[in-house]
Amino acid sequence: MIQFENIKSESLWSRETDIPSRLPLEGDLETETAVIGAGLAGLLTAYFLKKQGRKAIVLEADRIAGGQTKNTTAKITSQHGMIYSSIIKGIGKDKAKLYAMANQEAVRLYEKLITDQGIECHLRKLSSLLYSCQEADSLKREAEAAEALGLKAFYTEKTELPFRVEGAVCFEDQAQFEPLAFVKHISKELEIYEGTRALSVRGNVIETDHGNVKADHIVFATHYPFINVPGFYFLRQHQERSYVLALSGAEQYENMYYGVDTGALSFRNAGEYLLLGGSGHRTGDKKCGGAYETLAGEAVKLFPDCQIEAGWSAQDCVTHDRIPFIGRFSLYHSNWYVTTGFKKWGMTTSMVAARLITDQICEVENPYEILFQPARLLLRASAKDLLKDIGISTAGLIRGSFQKNRRCTHMGCGCRWNPNEQSWDCPCHGSRFKADGSLIDNPAQRAKSQNRKISGAGF
């Protein structure tokens, strides 16, 4: 029987790769571009700007790749769940093709960069498959849609999985890698200030807890934008959590797999381990308990002789139309840029975002700008998600007014206890706090009072 209780919550990547630390900012500074956030999207943006001969610095509140980048399952793929048939209906075939080509181009760019630079990050080319154990018709439509958009995708009923599927869509020419080994290489020559939290941004000045940074261009690559106005991103997306176990003694698969049914699992190998993912839920959902235990139960059922070697979780921003926000932050700040709303596909989208924002700063035309522009109007089909998010946020704000000790420091919503990770999570916008009130995830910028420990009753 698998014993999960003794497994430390830490990703394989964090265990296997140590990135040298950097010093905090020391006083005021001026630069051409300041990137806020040293996750993969921010680092790649600074990397490409440097390659273009532009001066760029990176500000990081904690450690390089210390947020979602270290917790990814590290799939580099244009297979983004059941998306292509729906976005063709929502935005038309021409724009849907932009989405497909942007992400497939990102797969190729990773391969070229890793090959040209000789980066040892266990890059592996393979196929990525969507599968369903319940029905096949929607998968057939998805395969037809993806193929019509120029992707190498086809419908099949054959997989390597240890259970019967009704059907699957195979996307060829995809990849996977070890993200922190990649980050360690590309960050070597970048000017990065760790332990430097951006507190506010006014015009072209970033106020941090270690001095002010004046920049011609400012890139918000903080996973979730911490500036509420302008942009109003807190009204335009929510956050979700998902979980993964690294198993030894399990199967070795030639490809990656992602289930589309409710409660389905994802699979990919990482060296000798199999990464088993699933149990996702909206951040702050009151029914979120038992995620790791559910995955452990599935692991035992599928691979009776396996052992859990690691377990961890990730958080994803989800826009109402399922298309990321990448580009100029708002109509009122032409020198601010933002990248957020990657859903579960942060590795591929980080490359898309870095190239697009680099082109905008360097005044180079990018064919994908019109698709990802943050100022776009929401799809009519996304109105249902918008109303749902407004309802959840309103309920959270009301709850926060009666539970002052458990209010999120972002906008005052009432937090809920997450028994999977022993944290207080905000259902409105996804901020998370440790039991002692210290901050885990943004958009909140402040911890709760450090003098009042959170108990079961509140902070």
Image (tube, rainbow, N blue to C red):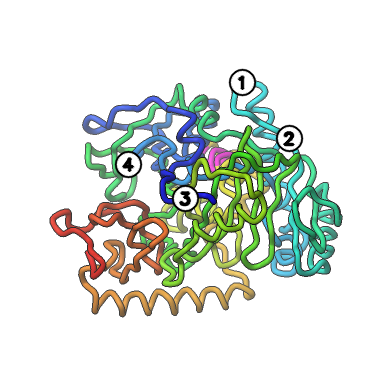
SS type, badge 3: loop
- Residue occupying image coordinates x 37% and y 30%: 192
Looking at the rendered image, the disc whose residue lies closer to the viewer, 3 or 2, is 3
- In this rendering, would 182 be left or right of 76? left
- Residue occupying image coordinates x 59% and y 72%: 382
Name the residue tied to disc 3: 4
- Name which of mark 1 and mark 4 comes first in the sequence: 4
Name the residue tied to disc 2: 125
Whole-angstrom CA distance, mark 4 to mark 3, is 31 Å
Classify 10 Å Cα crowding around label 3: few (below 14), some (14-19), many (20 and above).
some
Which region shows up in magenta? 354-361
SS type, badge 2: strand
- In this rendering, would 146 be left or right of 374? right
- Amino acid at the residue labelled 4: Ala
SS type, badge 4: loop
- Amino acid at the residue labelled 1: Gln
Name the residue tied to disc 4: 61
